Image (cartoon, rainbow, N blue to C red):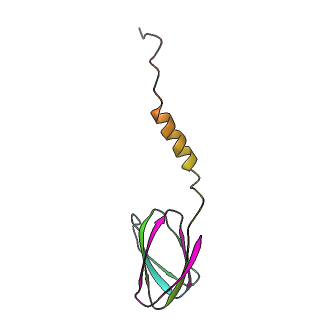
Amino acid sequence: MARIIDLQDGELLRIDAKAGTRVQVLFGAIWLTEPLRLDDVFAASGDEVTLDHGGRVLVEAQGFARVIVAVSTRQPAFAGLLAQLRKLARRPVPAPTHAIV
């Protein structure tokens, strides 16, 4: 799902996003901050930012800006692996059947 959003100078957009969401700047420039990202991002026309962590993301227009916010429908490649590891972690470990002498 993608939304096109127009922002006026200094207007803040709050996005409750998940990892993998993309913010593409069609026109103008933005400042973006994402939880757990070490640096803020400044992006201009043609730039695209893929969110690493998601959460509550803030986008501020630096002058008039038009952005597309595209929510990723794909799960990270490691999502299936994590589910398998969680399942294995819940499985009981059998007791050893031999004695160590």
**Magenta segment range?**
1-26
Question: Is residue 37 shown above or below 44?
Answer: above
Query: Residue 14 location in percent, x, y?
Result: 42, 75
**Residue at the extreme top of the image, as rendered:** 101
Residue 24: x %, y % from top left: 56, 77
The answer to which image quadrant residue 36 occupies is: bottom left
Q: Where's residue 79, x and y in %?
A: 55, 50
Q: Which residue is drawn at 57% across and 46% down?
A: 80
Q: State which quadrant residue 69 falls in.
A: bottom right
Check residue 46 for magenta coloring: no
Most common secondary structure along the magenta stretch: strand
Q: Where is residue 65 in the image (x, y as percent from the top left)?
A: 51, 87
| Circle count | 0
Q: Which residue is found at the position 51% from the left and 39% from the top?
A: 85
Quarter of the image where the N terminus is located: bottom right
Q: Which residue is drawn at 41% across and 66% down?
A: 37
Q: Identify the image quadrant of the C terminus.
A: top left
Residue 3 is inside the magenta segment: yes
- Vertical position of residue 94 compared to residue 41: above or below: above
**Residue drawn at point x = 60 percent, y = 59 percent:** 74
